Image (cartoon, helix red, strand yellow):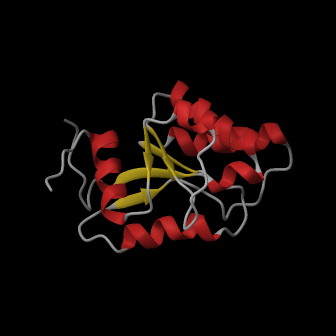
């Protein structure tokens, strides 16, 4: 088991993004903020200027993912930019980061097979289940009930 998550040692989290204002991206953090005693640091940088080339975007994503302990991919992003989301998944796996895929919010759409194949777990939009999965996959913490 790793070091427990605390205010002094927050979980480092990367959430997929495409350098734009995105409701699902923000919703992840709304769910996390509603959980008591869960401390995290967001390693994602969607507010940064969008890098001008595909390779520069990949390099920025590599740096953001490298700083994280767990990678959360939003299934809804796949329809907008499948190539970028699949890059994030493959890089996270190569960097030995757990990949957790959040299903579509509010609609029963299937998660693309390419995301399922690279995922350690598929998650529903449930704050408690999300935090439990982050704790388990990032730090080996088991939660009760």
Instruction: Please identify the quarter of the rendering in which residue 41 is found.
Output: bottom left
Looking at the image, which residue is at 13% across and 53% down? Answer: 144
Q: Is residue 22 visible?
A: yes
Looking at the image, which residue is at 44% across and 57% down? Answer: 124
Q: Which residue lies furthest to the front in this view?
A: 108
Front residue of 118/140: it is: 118
Number of marks in picture: 0
Q: Where is residue 59 in the image (x, y as percent from the top left)?
A: 70, 38
Q: Position of residue 96 (x, y in %)?
A: 46, 28
Q: Is residue 63 left or right of residue 135?
A: right
Q: Residue furthest top?
A: 94
Front residue of 88/6: it is: 88
Front residue of 78/98: it is: 78
Looking at the image, which residue is at 78% across and 56% down? Answer: 50
Q: Is residue 94 left or right of residue 46?
A: left
Q: In this view, does 143 lie to the left or right of 94?
A: left
Q: In which quarter of the image is the N terminus?
A: top left
Q: Where is residue 123 in the image (x, y as percent from the top left)?
A: 43, 51
Instruction: Please identify the quarter of the rendering in which residue 65 is found.
Output: top right
Q: Is residue 113 left or right of residue 135?
A: right
Q: Can residue 68 be seen in this view?
A: no
Looking at the image, which residue is at 15% across and 56% down? Answer: 145
Q: Residue furthest right?
A: 52
């Amino acid at each position: 088991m790793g070091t427990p998550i605390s205010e002094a040692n927050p979980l480092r989290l990367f959430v997929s993004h495409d350098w734009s204002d995105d409701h699902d991206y923000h919703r992840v953090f709304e769910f996390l903020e509603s959980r008591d005693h869960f401390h995290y640091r967001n390693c994602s940088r969607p507010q940064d200027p969008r890098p001008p080339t595909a390779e520069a975007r990949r390099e920025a994503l590599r740096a953001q993912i490298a700083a994280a302990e767990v990678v959360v991919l939003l299934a809804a992003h796949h329809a907008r930019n499948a190539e970028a989301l699949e890059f994030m998944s493959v890089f996270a796996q190569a960097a030995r980061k757990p990949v957790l895929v959040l299903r579509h919010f509010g609609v029963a759409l299937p998660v693309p097979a390419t995301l399922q194949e690279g995922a350690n777990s598929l998650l529903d939009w449930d704050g408690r289940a999300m935090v439990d999965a982050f704790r388990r996959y990032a730090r080996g913490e088991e939660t009760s009930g």
